[in-house]
Amino acid sequence: MGIDGNSRDLFSRIIYGSRLSLQIGVSTVTFAILLGGLLGAMAGFVGGWLDDVIMRSLDVFDGFSKPAAGDCDCFSTRPRVNQCFVGDRDC
């Protein structure tokens, strides 16, 4: 990347400026891995009704994210007739 007009290294300045973003990203991924591992281990080892409760609650969360992502995709781009149908990803 080189240096700026004051002979300062640009790459190190970019890394220093992105500390907060990197911390947020790493902590979010770490939290997701720990929570997912804990829920998966509980569902796998205990099984039975606890497995059913965990899996159905995750199915509910999974069901909310897909229609919202489809709406954002449909409304953020140039509208086409076949784009807004559910399951149609041939845009």
Image (cartoon, rainbow, N blue to C red):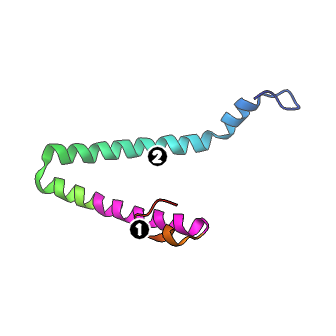
User: What's the amino acid at mark 1?
Assistant: Val
Q: Nearer the viewer, residue 63 or 50?
A: 63
Find disc 2 in the rendering and name its residue.
28
**Quadrant of the rendered image containing residue 6:** top right
Q: Are marks 1 and 2 in contact (CB under 8 Å)?
A: no
Discs 1/2, front:
1
Q: Is residue 51 left or right of residue 13?
A: left
Find disc 1 in the rendering and name its residue.
86
- Label the magenta part by its dominant secondary structure: helix
| Residue 14 screen position, x and y as percent | 70, 36
Q: Residue at x 47, y 62 (%)?
A: 69
Q: Which residues are magenta?
A: 58-78
Decide whether residue 21 is among the magenta residues.
Answer: no
| Residue 90 screen position, x and y as percent | 48, 59
User: What's the amino acid at mark 2?
Assistant: Thr
Q: CA distance from mark 1 to mark 2?
A: 30 Å
